[in-house]
């Protein structure tokens, strides 16, 4: 499975297990911090989202899960807020159940005066928004989405106007592209580091975001390729 950049550069795709190993090596052997990679992901997502909003300005709702994907979405919300864009957050878990990285990102937003939406506010905010950012699950999907995450996905699919997913649409298996339950119907996906093999089944616009992982990390799992970003931090890509 392979993808290509807008300039024709070949880009290999990774399975879920390969991506987990890349993340592990980046942290344990290369001392690249989770928050560093998350910051890069969130900033790139905000830049791409801002570009999309130039066509149709308006508000943004970020759907955020408790893990790294959610942390990247919350980080994106901060960057959008810093640029004067009205943004709100809908969490799939209570604040007390967020992981360390997501909690760290949310604390900055909270101190900036942005609090997660109340349950009775979420559907109306999604409905009036120009863009919904899906940062619920990412490549950590195990079986069909459940509970509040599934509810947020269903609401998003029912009333959202335009949706961009971070890394992979929530509810899609990042290796196979299968959807064992409800899944976000994204118009756009910004995948991170390298594309996931399951995105071969994604029919929307696809972008690749650089989160600062050295190419030597990929060599550790036997994957070598030409760096596709040139002087950019996110690029459009397509599958072969």
Image (cartoon, rainbow, N blue to C red):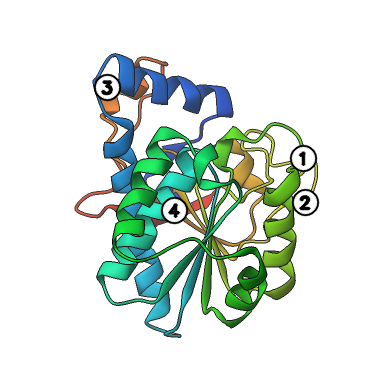
Distance from disc 3 to disc 2, alpha carbons, whole Å, reads: 37 Å
Distance from disc 4 to disc 2, alpha carbons, whole Å, reads: 20 Å
**Quarter of the image holding residue 156?**
bottom right
Q: Which mark is residue 182?
A: 2
Q: Earlier in the sequence, mark 3 or mark 1?
A: 1
Asked if disc 3 and disc 1 are in contact, CB closer than 8 Å, the reply is no
- In this view, the residue in front, 194 or 223, is 194
Look at 58% across and 33% down and name the residue there: 140
Residue 232, x across and y down, in percent: 24, 55
Residue 183, x across and y down, in percent: 72, 52
Disc 1, SS: loop
Residue under label 1, please give it: 144
Q: Earlier in the sequence, mark 1 or mark 2?
A: 1
Look at 29% across and 46% down and name the residue there: 39
Distance from disc 4 to disc 3, alpha carbons, whole Å, reads: 27 Å
Q: Specify few, some or many for label 4: CA neighbours under 10 Å numbering under 14, 14-19, or 20 or more.
A: many
Q: In the figure, 130 relative to 25: above or below?
A: below
Residue 207, x across and y down, in percent: 44, 55
Image quadrant where one finds the N terminus: top right
Residue 138, x across and y down, in percent: 56, 42
Q: Which mark is residue 73?
A: 4
- In this view, the residue in front, 33 or 104, is 104
**Quarter of the image holding residue 90?**
bottom right
Look at 45% across and 19% down and name the residue there: 21
Residue under label 3, please give it: 216
Nearer the camera: disc 4 or disc 3: 4
Disc 2, SS: loop
Distance from disc 1 to disc 2, alpha carbons, whole Å, reads: 7 Å
């Amino acid at each position: 499975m392979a993808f290509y950049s807008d300039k024709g550069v070949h880009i290999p795709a990774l399975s879920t297990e390969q991506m987990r190993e890349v993340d592990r090596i980046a942290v344990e052997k290369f001392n690249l911090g989770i928050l560093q990679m998350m910051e890069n992901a969130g900033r790139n997502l905000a830049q791409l989202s801002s570009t999309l909003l130039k066509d149709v300005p308006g508000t943004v709702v970020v759907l955020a899960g408790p893990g790294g994907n959610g942390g990247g979405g919350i980080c994106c919300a901060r960057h959008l807020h810093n640029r004067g864009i009205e943004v709100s957050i809908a969490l799939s878990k209570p604040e007390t159940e967020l992981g360390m990285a997501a909690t760290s990102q949310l604390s900055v937003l909270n101190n900036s005066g942005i609090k997660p939406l109340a349950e009775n506010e979420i559907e109306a905010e999604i409905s009036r928004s120009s863009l919904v950012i899906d940062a619920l699950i990412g490549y950590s999907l195990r079986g069909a989405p459940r509970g509040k995450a599934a509810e947020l996905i269903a609401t998003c699919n029912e009333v959202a106007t335009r949706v961009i997913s971070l890394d992979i649409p929530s509810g899609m298996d990042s290796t196979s592209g299968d959807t064992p339950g409800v899944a976000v119907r994204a118009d756009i996906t910004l995948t991170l580091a390298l594309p996931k093999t399951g995105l071969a089944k994604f029919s929307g616009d696809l972008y690749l975001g650089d989160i600062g992982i050295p190419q030597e990390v990929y060599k550790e799992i036997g994957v070598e390729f030409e760096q596709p970003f040139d002087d950019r931090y996110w690029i459009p890509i397509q599958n072969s």
